[in-house]
Amino acid sequence: MSEPFKVVNYVNQFFAGVGGEDKANHPVEFKEGAIGSARGLQQQLGSAATVVATVYGGDNFVNEEKDRAFAAIADALRKFAPDVVIAGPAFNAGRYGLACAEVCRIAREKRIPAVAAMYPENPGVLTHRADTLIVPTSESPAGMPAAHKALAALALKLARKEELGPAEAEGYLPRGIRRMGYREAPAARRAEQDHEEDAREEFVRKHRSHLQQRGKSLFARRGGTGLSLIIEAEGRLGAGKSSSPEAGI
């Protein structure tokens, strides 16, 4: 059985359990193993990977004392030689998000795959989206379990050196990278299908109440329900056989 992959997780002072805003100038440090929020990440990684160290620093320190902070982060990565680096999740904390993006940059410079997680409107996304692999999160830490799950899945793919698919399939934010791909239907047919779907949704939205009433009145005779009649009406509309709720039933 192969050894578990080695992971280094970067978190800020709050999620490391050091303190809140009063500890925002705390220097970058590390502890072996998973501490603070990194414990939840370890649960999602399971036996496939081990958080060998948690690197943490105050949000102000990392963003204002960049030379010292970045050097300390680089030293930690050299010491633990992880297979993959995970930064965050930072949610919508701006300084934290910027720090996570910088951690990923430092990792890339050392040829270590890295992934961060934060809210799509975080400044870290706005400034580093093109060159950083970022998993979208909720705005607040209430979404921590989901963020850890998504991070773990993507980090394991990186550690295995598997090729990543499109952003929408893998669950990360698009980076503006265009790739050749194959689709079952040509563009004209896809546009037609989208138009048909929009027409069905608009039909049901406008006539839902009427269709439900008709469904109740025809329940005994047709053996159906209001919902089944709506579905039937949608199907006929898609086939071009109805243009009004009366004709659709």
Image (tube, helix red, strand yellow):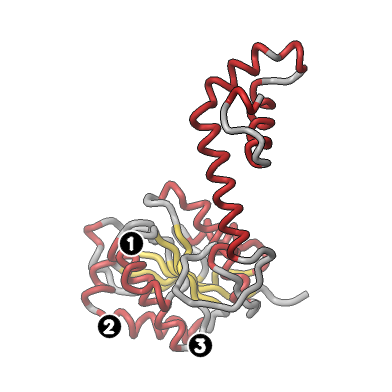
Q: Which mark is residue 29?
A: none
Residue at 29% across / 67% down in the picture?
58
Q: Would residue 50 be found to the left or right of residue 68 on screen?
A: right
How far from the left and from the top, in percent, is residue 141?
A: 40, 51
Identify the element where label 3 is drawn. Answer: loop
How far from the left and from the top, in percent, is residue 99?
A: 33, 71
Using a 10 Å C-alpha cutoff, classify the residue at mark 1 as few (fewer than 14 neighbours), some (14 to 19) or many (20 or more): many
Disc 1 residue type (three-letter): Asn
The earlier-in-sequence mark between 1 and 3 is: 3
Q: Nearer the viewer, residue 134 or 34?
A: 134
How far from the left and from the top, in percent, is residue 183?
A: 65, 67
CA distance separating discs 2 and 1? 24 Å
Residue at 59% across / 62% down in the picture?
188
Q: Would residue 208 be found to the left or right of residue 228 on screen?
A: left
Q: Which mark is residue 111?
A: 3
**As drawn, 226 above or below 95:** above
CA distance separating discs 1 and 3? 25 Å
Q: Which mark is residue 122?
A: 1
The earlier-in-sequence mark between 3 and 2 is: 2
Identify the element where label 2 is drawn. Answer: helix
Q: Quadrant of the C terminus?
A: top right
How far from the left and from the top, in percent, is residue 66?
A: 26, 80
Whether label 2 touches label 1, CB < 8 Å: no
Disc 3 residue type (three-letter): Arg
Q: Quadrant of residue 64?
A: bottom left
Q: Quadrant of the N terminus?
A: bottom right
Q: Which mark is residue 68?
A: 2
Identify the element where label 1 is drawn. Answer: loop
Q: Nearer the viewer, mark 3 or mark 2?
A: 3
